[in-house]
């Protein structure tokens, strides 16, 4: 019987793969496979699996050490939470990624770079396998790293992604929702960077976020890479588009408001 | 790996992407939503991240996940918050959610001070960090200097059900630490932080309990930013969308001053117009775009239900108050019956400005495809005047009857009632303006204190006039409704109108529930008595 895969490409994934690669990566796979034909562009990439994460914990003995550290956790005490969180993350960042996984990541990165020497810039995002539960968005719960270049940097970031499953807020969130800390695994998504440092990026909701009005799309836009909007570092432009007549060929931009867009992330 | 750099002022004043990009993204958003809804087997609004490549100019989707707040909402109970008093506004920004909250302002400059937050405090800070979530739960409201509707602070506040104002620019400087403040998100898309604890209330409306009526219940809407929210209330559309709010709040400049911008002699006025319209080379286009945006928000909110927008109906003194307005408006002793309504539209002093209004309406109907928009002409004194206005509209590309365009007339001058059959030949429908009709039927100046006590819509002369108008218009096969204050203020008038067989009653949003119930009751009584 063949071993479970350590990495999977977007074209091998769909929305049913949440247990293996988390909500974000499964969603990217779903769009990559099904919406390209409708003209929607999604940058290519791959994801490490939950199996790879568990392999990492077991081979390094981290699972036992983390359980040990979390014995004395009290999330209602901010200082206690910070102390335990820091300790767990330190353990993860000091561990070696198992060779089998390292090789798979490097090989896939090289393929994503079209064998370009030195490699392409990628965006690296962690995705928890229980993330995007219908009752909580985990807003910003796991980290994103942009403009990652070269295999050494990539592997280092992968470790940081694993550590991000144990940020103070993630620990506190799981404790509050009653999830076991080890029932959730982490997948790392590695995707070709879009050069939005030279243009713009943003967020779009297909519903009005304030009123729940279903017929409008809300778009936020700012110059540079997207993180500033999510983090709230800039006041972005805001556009509303009306869905029903957009679908029948009209150009219903209902409203455009200029944001101050003081900074851009490059 | 990444760093933040300042953006040049010129670039900041421009939109980050062009209209084609906006439309492409929105189309993709719809496709993604449709796809996920199909896969999930239920309606699935989406939260999407996109990016544009500066080298190839291509757009990309880099993430998509189901939206988590509104898609979880269940039941038919609509909660609405209302501020009962107004106070000094300390700071304003984007409102998140529709609630109101109050508490002691805790101005947090660094994560180190987060421990200062006590349950019920208002968290005031530059921006929030995901690490702060446990603390944010304790707050009664959140105010940030930076961020848009999709930033972390906004998303978390929405999930926690907290009122929040993001992008309030200098909140941490202006709001005094330790002061009691009220955070209001119940006034449309701009949220305000008020000094002190203001009185507010929260109403819960169970929409499933609302009876449907034969008489159409429509709404009176002025502020486009409230339209999405108001569309959640049960109604048959908008019987009166007022342009004046949009012109006063968002345009602020007299349209003639925009048309004659290059020839303006008043340097101060010219500079002020330049400042307010810096994004526009073509100054009249600023008027057209801004008006179209305001009207389109209302038309979209209620689509495909009817939305009847009334062409501008300021009095000369109100027009004069717009920037650059004095030059174009005569000083009138009695503006209420002066250069007002239809008479302006074909007059040389305003007809070009009316042309801009028409262009804006065409944009909403033709470019945006919002064909549910109907137009209404206010204060039309004679049938001949009505014809002139229709000709003027046709000259600007608005042909009555073409592409489903219906043009209504306000029924607010006694002549409109007396000659209703004649007006019915050239207009598609009538909307009674009870305020003016009362004023002119009783000869009472609404602005006069001394005769104010005589102003009463329930006067038999007015009631008689209402009944006559309904009878004549119905007889001519046209539709007639009412969009004045009277049915909201006096349930007995609403009752009278229903009995006379009026087609629709337009109410202020806060009377929709109460008066709607009353209408249903009257209808059922009428039914019972007719069965007997």
Image (cartoon, rainbow, N blue to C red):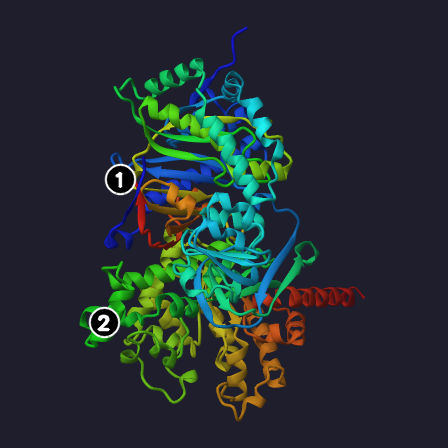
**Mark 2: which secondary structure?**
helix
Estimate the x, y position of residue B525 in percent, counting from the top left: 75, 67
Q: Quadrant of the C terminus of chain A?
A: top left
Vertically, is B369 above or below B514? above
Q: Position of residue A206 (x, y in %)?
A: 48, 43
What subunit carries mark 1? A
Q: Nearer the viewer, residue A54 or B308?
A: A54
> As drawn, is A192 to the left or to the right of B417?
left
- Residue B453, how many percent across, how many down? 58, 89
> From the image, which quarter does the N terminus of chain A lie in?
top right
**Looking at the picture, does residue B208 appear above or below residue B491?**
above
Q: Residues within 10 Å of mark 1 (few under 14, many from 20)?
A: some
Q: Splitting the image into 4 quarters, where does residue A148 fall?
A: top left
Q: Is residue B214 above or below residue B431?
A: above
Q: Which residue is at the front of the view, B113 or B154?
A: B113
Q: Which mark is residue A198?
A: 1
The image shows residue A133 at horizontal and vertical percentages of 58, 35
- Compute the Cα span from label 1 to label 2: 36 Å
Q: Residues within 10 Å of mark 2 (few under 14, many from 20)?
A: some
Q: Is residue B17 visible?
A: no
Give the camera-side residue of B150 and A211.
B150
Q: Secondary structure at mark 1?
A: helix
């Amino acid at each position: 019987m063949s071993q479970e895969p350590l990495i999977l490409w977007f074209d091998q994934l769909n929305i049913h793969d949440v247990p293996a690669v988390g909500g974000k990566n499964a969603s990217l796979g779903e769009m990559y496979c099904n919406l390209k034909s409708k003209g929607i562009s999604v940058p290519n990439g791959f994801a490490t699996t939950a199996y790879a994460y568990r392999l990492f914990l077991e081979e390094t003995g981290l699972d036992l050490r983390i359980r040990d550290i979390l014995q004395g956790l009290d999330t209602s005490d901010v200082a206690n939470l910070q102390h335990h969180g820091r300790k767990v993350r330190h353990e993860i960042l000091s561990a070696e990624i198992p060779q089998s996984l390292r090789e798979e990541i490097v090989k896939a990165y090289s393929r994503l770079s079209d064998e370009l020497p030195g490699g392409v810039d990628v965006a690296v995002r962690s995705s928890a396998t229980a993330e995007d539960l219908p009752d909580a968005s985990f807003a910003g719960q796991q980290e994103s790293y942009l403009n990652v270049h070269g295999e050494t940097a990539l592997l280092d970031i992968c470790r940081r992604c694993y550590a991000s499953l144990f940020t103070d807020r993630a620990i506190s969130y799981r404790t509050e929702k009653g999830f076991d800390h080890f029932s959730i695994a982490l997948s790392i998504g590695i995707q070709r960077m879009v050069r939005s440092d030279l243009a713009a990026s943003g967020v779009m909701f297909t519903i009005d976020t304030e009123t729940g009005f279903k017929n409008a799309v809300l778009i936020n836009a700012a110059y540079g890479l997207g993180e500033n909007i999510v983090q709230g570092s800039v006041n972005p432009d805001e556009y509303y588009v009306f869905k029903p007549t957009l679908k029948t060929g009209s150009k219903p931009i209902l409203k455009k408001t200029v944001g101050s867009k003081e900074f851009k992330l490059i | 790996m990444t760093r933040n750099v300042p953006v040049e002022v010129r670039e900041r004043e421009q939109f980050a992407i062009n209209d084609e990009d906006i439309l492409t993204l929105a189309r993709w958003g719809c496709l993604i939503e449709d796809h996920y809804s199909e896969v999930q087997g239920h309606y699935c609004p989406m939260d999407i991240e996109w990016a544009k490549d500066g080298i190839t100019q291509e757009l990309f989707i880099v993430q998509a996940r189901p939206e988590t707040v509104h898609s979880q909402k269940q039941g038919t109970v609509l909660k609405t918050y209302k501020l009962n008093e107004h106070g000094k506004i300390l700071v304003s920004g984007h409102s998140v959610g529709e609630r109101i909250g109050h508490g002691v302002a805790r101005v947090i400059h660094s994560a180190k001070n987060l421990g200062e937050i006590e349950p019920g405090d208002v968290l005031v800070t530059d921006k929030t960090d995901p690490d702060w979530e446990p603390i944010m739960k304790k707050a009664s409201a959140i105010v940030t200097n930076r961020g848009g509707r999709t930033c972390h602070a906004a998303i978390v506040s929405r999930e926690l059900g907290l009122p929040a104002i993001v992008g309030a620019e200098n909140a941490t400087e202006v709001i005094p630490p330790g002061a009691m403040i009220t955070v209001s998100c119940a006034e449309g898309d701009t949220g305000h932080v008020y000094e002190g604890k203001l009185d507010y209330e929260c109403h819960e409306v169970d929409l499933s309990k609302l009876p449907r009526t034969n008489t159409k219940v429509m709404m009176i809407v002025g502020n486009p930013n409230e339209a999405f929210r108001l569309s959640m209330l049960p109604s048959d559309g908008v019987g009166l969308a007022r342009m004046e709010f949009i012109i006063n709040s968002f345009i602020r400049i007299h349209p003639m001053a925009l048309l004659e911008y290059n020839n303006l002699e008043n340097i101060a006025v010219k500079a002020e117009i330049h400042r307010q319209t810096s994004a526009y080379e073509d100054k009249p286009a600023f008027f057209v775009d801004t008006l179209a945006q305001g009207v389109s928000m209302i038309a979209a909110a209620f689509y495909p239900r009817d939305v009847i927008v009334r062409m501008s109906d300021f009095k000369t003194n109100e027009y004069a108050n717009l920037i650059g307005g004095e030059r174009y408006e005569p000083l009138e002793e009695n503006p209420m019956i002066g250069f007002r309504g239809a008479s302006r539209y074909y007059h040389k002093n305003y007809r070009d400005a009316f042309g801009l209004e028409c262009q804006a309406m065409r944009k909403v109907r033709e470019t945006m495809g919002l064909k549910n928009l109907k137009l209404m002409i206010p204060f039309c004194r004679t049938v001949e005047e009505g014809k002139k206005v229709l000709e003027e509209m046709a000259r600007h590309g608005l042909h009555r009857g073409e592409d489903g365009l219906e043009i209504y007339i306000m029924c607010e001058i006694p002549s409109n009632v007396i000659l209703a059959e004649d007006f019915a030949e050239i207009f598609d429908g009538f909307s009674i303006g009870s305020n003016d009709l009362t004023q002119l039927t009783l000869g009472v100046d609404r602005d006069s204190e001394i005769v104010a006590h005589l102003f009463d819509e329930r006067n038999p002369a007015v009631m008689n006039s209402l009944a006559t108008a309904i009878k004549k218009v119905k007889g001519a096969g046209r539709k007639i409704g009412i969009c004045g204050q009277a049915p909201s203020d006096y349930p007995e008038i609403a009752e009278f109108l229903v009995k006379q067989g009026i087609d629709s009653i337009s109410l202020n949003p806060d009377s929709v529930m109460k008066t709607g119930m009353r209408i249903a009751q009257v209808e059922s009584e009428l039914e019972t008595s007719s069965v007997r």
